[in-house]
Amino acid sequence: KNQVEQSPQSLIILEGKNCTLQCNYTVSPFSNLRWYKQDTGRGPVSLTIMTFSENTKSNGRYTATLDADTKQSSLHITASQLSDSASYICVVSHSGTYKYIFGTGTRLKVLA
Amino acid sequence: DADVTQTPRNRITKTGKRIMLECSQTKGHDRMYWYRQDPGLGLRLIYYSFDVKDINKGEISDGYSVSRQAQAKFSLSLESAIPNQTALYFCATSDRRDGNTGELFFGEGSRLTVL
């Protein structure tokens, strides 16, 4: 069964600290993996995309990694800011179909 | 202005009422989607459309219908709303040139409460 699991469900950190969010998937065949950021009351916005051949990709303070062998991805946030408080959703695309498989998200709260 | 606009943003209605959620986009994308988001669950696909005359059911289409009035407009209807349709609904678009796995661009969401 094609599934995407994220951990932890929620996380609280202090401003300025780093954190890492995890995404494990069983989607096959795999096309790509995206991390989306969803602010409260807003729609998700894409942060980064990982394809099968990519291991690491950065977008400012966000760094995503992908291990296609173990079917795991992580999103590392460096020097967190209050504006990083949001839900982060991992979405895996099933190759050759319309399907996007969504994780349930990690809710991050950054405290001053 | 937002590229993907949803109306209404919030709606409270009663069981049995007919509800329409509307979505319009200025991104020029062919593909449009309706998703539902519930607490503790990932977004689930209700319906999708790859072109004006193309309508496809998603994984949870029962109790819903859609209409693609134009390339830029995709509406979702609940013919007879029930309380378990209380949820946050998102419209999304993608560019067909990106294939079947292109980036999704989401609207701001429509929060529906069915009493």
Image: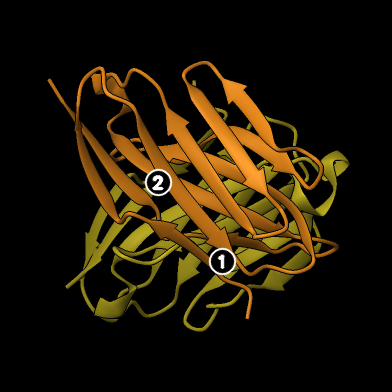
Chain colours: A orange, B yellow
- Name the element at disc 2: loop
Looking at the rendered image, the disc whose residue lies closer to the viewer, 2 or 1, is 1
Residue A65 found in image quarter: top right
Residue hosting label 2:
B109
Residue receiving disc 1: B45
Apparent side of residue B67 relative to residue A12 in the rendered image (left or right): right
Q: Is residue A94 visible?
A: yes
Q: Amino acid at mark 2?
A: Gly
A8 vs A49, left or right, is: left
Q: Earlier in the sequence, mark 2 or mark 1?
A: 1
Spot occupied by residue A18 in the image (x, y as percentages of width and height): 33, 27
Left or right: A25, with A17 as reference point: right
Is label 2 in contact with label 1 (beta carbons under 8 Å)? no
> Which quadrant is home to the N terminus of chain A?
bottom right
What is the chain letter for disc 2?
B
What is the crowding at mark 2: few (fewer than 14 residues within 10 Å), some, or many (at least 20)? many
Q: Quadrant of the C terminus of chain A?
A: top left
Residue B108 in view here: no
Instruction: Same chain for labels 2 and 1? Say yes or no.
Output: yes
Q: Residue at x 80, y 54 (%)?
A: B100
